[in-house]
Amino acid sequence: MKRLIACLGGDCPSFDDVAKLKYTEMVLAESMRLYPPAWALGRMAMEDFEIGGYVVPRKSLVLMSQYVMHRNPRYFAEPLRFDPDRWTREARESRPQFSYFPFGGGPRRCIGEGFAWMEGILVIATIARQWQLRLVPNHPVVLKPVMTLRPKHGMRMTVTRRQVQEQEQVL
């Protein structure tokens, strides 16, 4: 957590800080790896194609699950472990292109992706400056995959204001 927003120098984060908040971006990327907002997406095959020895006929609906792919041990060692260091430049470049696709990919990639990254980074940095959030002990984390992936029972958190000394360490 101490690395999360080390570049702000006590100020509230703004758009100009987003590029400096690399570790915050890594935390967000790892969070979306484990719990992608869109857990699956579908595409229609425009023509017959073969994949893995199977033929997918033209006009078939093909479903791809970010949730499943992002937990694949071929691409993410210890896939259930939260590890923001998976998102260093070198680590990203070592993986195949579509091993991580929280916003889809190709020409139908989410048009709001850039805004979502900026918003997520700034929200995390703003909250983490002054608050520490911990999951309430024994609160069940059960997923409810509907149109988006969400927690079935919400996420009950204990919120604690950071002490001035702690804020200085985080900042």
Image: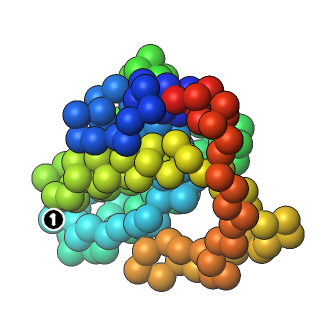
Q: Which structural element holds mark 1? A: loop
Residue 91 relative to residue 119: left or right: right
Q: Report which quarter residue 133 is drawn in.
A: bottom right
Can the viewer see residue 94? no
Relative image position of residue 40 (x, y in whole percent): 42, 67
Q: Residue at x 72, y 64 (%)?
A: 158
- Does 115 appear above or below 140? above
- Does 96 appear above or below 44? above
Give the total of numbered labels: 1
74 vs 159, nearest the viewer? 159
Question: What colour scheme has been applied to the protein in the rendered image?
Answer: rainbow
Looking at the figure, which quarter contains the N terminus? top right
Extreme right residue here?
138
Residue 109 relative to residue 10: left or right: left
Binning the other alpha carbons within 10 Å of mark 1 as few (below 14), some (14 to 19) or many (20 upward) gives few
Q: Residue at x 23, y 70 (%)?
A: 44
Amino acid under label 1?
Met
What residue is shown with label 1? 46
Relative image position of residue 33 (x, y in whole percent): 51, 49
Residue 166 relative to residue 88: left or right: right
Relative image position of residue 121 (x, y in whole percent): 39, 45
Q: Residue at x 38, y 36 (%)?
A: 11
Extreme top residue here?
90
26 vs 171, nearest the viewer? 171
Can the viewer see residue 138? yes
Residue 78 relative to residue 144: left or right: right
Q: Residue at x 50, y 52 (%)?
A: 127
Relative image position of residue 49 (x, y in whole percent): 26, 56
